[in-house]
Image (cartoon, rainbow, N blue to C red):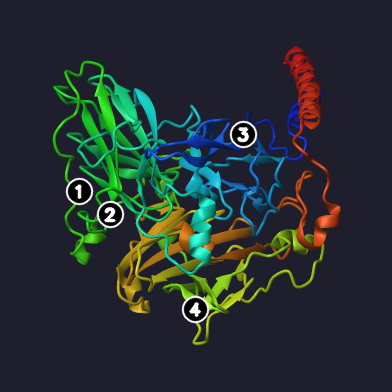
Amino acid sequence: MALLLRSSLLALICIALLSTRCFAADPTVSYDYKLTYITASPLGVPQQVIAVNGQFPGPLLNATTNYNVVVNVINELDEGLLITWPGIQMRRDSWEDGVRGTTCPIRPKRNFTYNFQVKDQIGSFFYYPSLNLQRASGGFGPVVINNREVIPIPFAQPDGDINLLIGDWYTQNHTALRTTLDSGNELGMPDGVLINGKGPFKYNSSVPDGIKYETLNVDPGKTYRFRVHNVGTSTSLNFRIQGHNLLLVETEGRYTSQQNYTSFDIHVGQSYSFLVTMDQNATTDYYVVASARYVNETVWQRVTGVAILHYSNSQGPAAGPLPEAPNDIYNQWSAMNQAKTIRQNTSASGARPNPQGSFHYGQINITDTYILRSLPPVSINGKMRATLNGISFRNPDTPIRLADVHKVKGAYKLDFPTQPMNRPPVVDTSVLNATYKGFVEIILQNNDTRLQSFHMDGYSFFVVGMDWGIWSESNRNGYNNWDAISRSTVEVHPGAWTAVLASLDNVGVWNLRVENLDRWYLGQETYMKIVNPEENGETEFAPPDNVVYCGQLQNLEKDNKSNAGSTMARRTNVFISLAMALSAVFFYNILV
């Protein structure tokens, strides 16, 4: 009887704290994120940026494996808003994914509370607004998911964590950039690179006076974990720290085999962790550099971000030329060499006690092959569009899974081709009909002229191969079937292909897209619909109680304005829930 009462009280705690989602008795972290416009001058030009709680970039979201995460997002912008969490797998719960194909936008002056569990995950990620190029104006921030204490990390505990959000930057905001793309033009060369929302240190006369730059304060002899994220619009960046090695240890939730690098390429949407030891003599400060990759550096010199690494015993400011970037931009065969060295640490434990290498993906039979080809943008019906397999995606008025639940006809088509089609390009809401528990091979064939990053929501995938030219079945002979890195965002070079393998065990509707914002905005994406044919309510969550309605279901929408009254009511409910939880804890302790 006591055991039954204890179980009931633990369930009461969970229900009190989580009204719409309940994940046993795992701890909960809660955040309020208010997104607003503020004026900033990161490159010396006043412009409108998107801040989170008045901060640019936004604050850290910090959780631990299996924690429940509750984020109340308040939209103070003048247009619809969604926040997405790339790399967070949202197990069984694509309702919380924060992209337009699965979720209706949060309208201006309204709020939406995201409620999800970081189930069986660890690592370094970031969040950002997913609609209409908004990320090009900010709204992004870092996400850290820590290991549980019972599972050791595969290296000595660092002396500190340093989050770096790097990315190319335009002095025009996202609405002006949209206008440029809508007119059929490319965005052109960015105006600079920001590091944590700040411009470059004045390393030479090309940098204007008065630019605020980022300073990283460290102590000699200590080792820090640098979590570096490329949150930019479209530019791959090379990251390096003058005089210091970068020991790669993790990428997007997977521990890597540990290897030192003097510089490292980080493509749009990617996240990496490096251990950096402060082992220099500190005669001066040191440059921290993020510069445009695979470009003519003489022409693109302004697209360089520079921060300062400052030892507590430093004897003077940084001076002299920046550390050199790789000089192999005209040698395509060496461009992939670094990416091919990124492999998983098969003996390390991640979110679970079993080693990462215990999932023998190379021994699983492939059930389906999808070949997704991207081409340079083309004019379709008089508008410039980007395509995958000849289809430029048009977001549905009614989100895909919501249309299913309410039996809305014609919201989308379940006919996305699994290979390129020999037909004129079209604009359509075409979704890939994927098989639940299938093990798929996805070939990302980039016939565009620019390097692209591809991302899959809801999953990580094994990067088993990449090479130049057109993929063929014979390329499977060169796949890495043993220790390929598992991640959620991967680069595909122009005129080349990347092959990934994924186990489709997460039901829902999941976005598959290019992370380069210009191509994404122009339609280079699709969705995978993965449904358990024997669904009984146990493998996929129902829509949350606070689901937002739009499109053909607009009449079901509730009033959830984020005014003072509703905020006070929400806080009152929180206090009531907390009182219930504390009471439950009190009686639970008595029983124990």
Q: Report the number of numbered marks.
A: 4
Amino acid type for the residue under numbered disc 1 = Ala
Q: Please report whichever mark, 2 or 1, sits nearer to the chain's N-terminal start.
A: 2
Mark 3 vs mark 4: which is more N-terminal?
3
Q: Is residue 412 above or below residue 490?
A: below
Q: Nearer the viewer, residue 40 or 25?
A: 40
The relative height of residue 305 versus residue 292 in the rendered view (above or below) is above
Q: Residues within 10 Å of mark 3 (few under 14, many from 20)?
A: many
Say which mark, if any, is on residue 325: 1
Task: Say whether residue 340 is visible.
Answer: yes
- Give the x, y percent position of residue 576: 81, 22
Q: Nearer the viewer, residue 13 or 109?
A: 109
Under tag 3, what secondary structure? strand
Q: Which residue is mark 3?
A: 33
Labels 2 & 1 near each other (Cβ < 8 A)? yes
Relative placement, left or right, of 379 versus 131 is left
Quadrant placement of the N terminus? top right
Q: Residues within 10 Å of mark 1 (few under 14, many from 20)?
A: many
- Give left or right: position of 314 versus 81: left
In terms of secondary structure, where does tag 4 sit?
loop
Residue 293: mark in rendering: 2
Which is in the foreground here, disc 4 or disc 2? 2
Distance from the alpha carbon under mark 3 to that under mark 4: 41 Å
Query: Disc 3 and disc 2: Cα gap in Å?
Result: 33 Å
